Amino acid sequence: MMSRWNIDVAHSTAEFSIRHLMISTVKGRFSGIEGAIVGEPEHLENGSVEVTLDIASVDTRQAERDVHLRSADFFDVEKFPQMLFKSTKIIPAGNNRYTVVGDLSIHGVTRSETFDVTFEGRAKDPWGGERAGFSGTSKINRKDYGLQWNVALEAGGVMVGDEVKINVEIEAIRQAD
């Protein structure tokens, strides 16, 4: 039997990091995360994962930068308010780890991407429910999704790197069968 585990937004995060000025790393997160995992956490190979992020919820702890990220220069939230990942294949990798391949849609572009996912365990909560934890990482190239904005630096190089590192921490609540 396949169980449905809904993402608990209060206990889940979707974070990213990207190089800035070729000398440092800027980090941010999306607080608007929802979705579900279908299957048994210890045997996800027959299951599925779907995660939606609210792009307007981007937070880099710098308000002006966040406004710029929401603009047409980057995410263009007016036209593309959500980022979506939908698994197409889940491959066991041993020791509670999975390779999750799926379609990632950002800025009107959908591409196949791979996440390394670890099942962190499951536990009963104080309210009689059951929860499962997962962590996942990936790297994407922002230009593959039409996120082209950049500024050339006087000393060479560019203001914003192309490689984006993604880290998700998900706590999901099992739904009644």
Image (spheres, grey):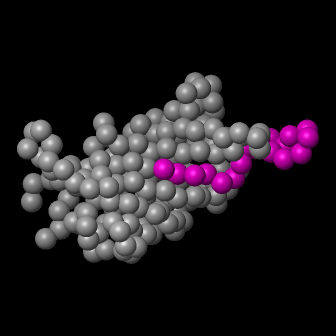
The number of discs equals 0
Q: Residue at x 59, y 58 (%)?
A: 140
Q: Residue at x 57, y 58 (%)?
A: 139
Visible in this render: residue 78? Answer: no
Quadrant of res 21: top right
Reply above or below: 95 against 109: below
Expressed as whole percent of the image width and height from the top left, the position of residue 51 reads 37, 54
- Outermost residue, right side: 155
Answer with left or right where residue 72 lies relative to residue 8: right
Residue 166 lies in magenta, yes or no?
Answer: yes
Quadrant of res 5: bottom left
Residue 114 lies in magenta, yes or no?
Answer: no
Residue nearest the viewer, comparing 152 with 95: 95
Expressed as whole percent of the image width and height from the top left, the position of residue 82 reads 45, 47
- Outermost residue, top side: 63
Residue nearest the viewer, comparing 51 with 171: 171
Q: Which residues are magenta?
A: 150-167
Q: Residue at x 13, y 71 (%)?
A: 1
Reply above or below: 85 against 80: below
Q: Residue at x 55, y 27 (%)?
A: 61
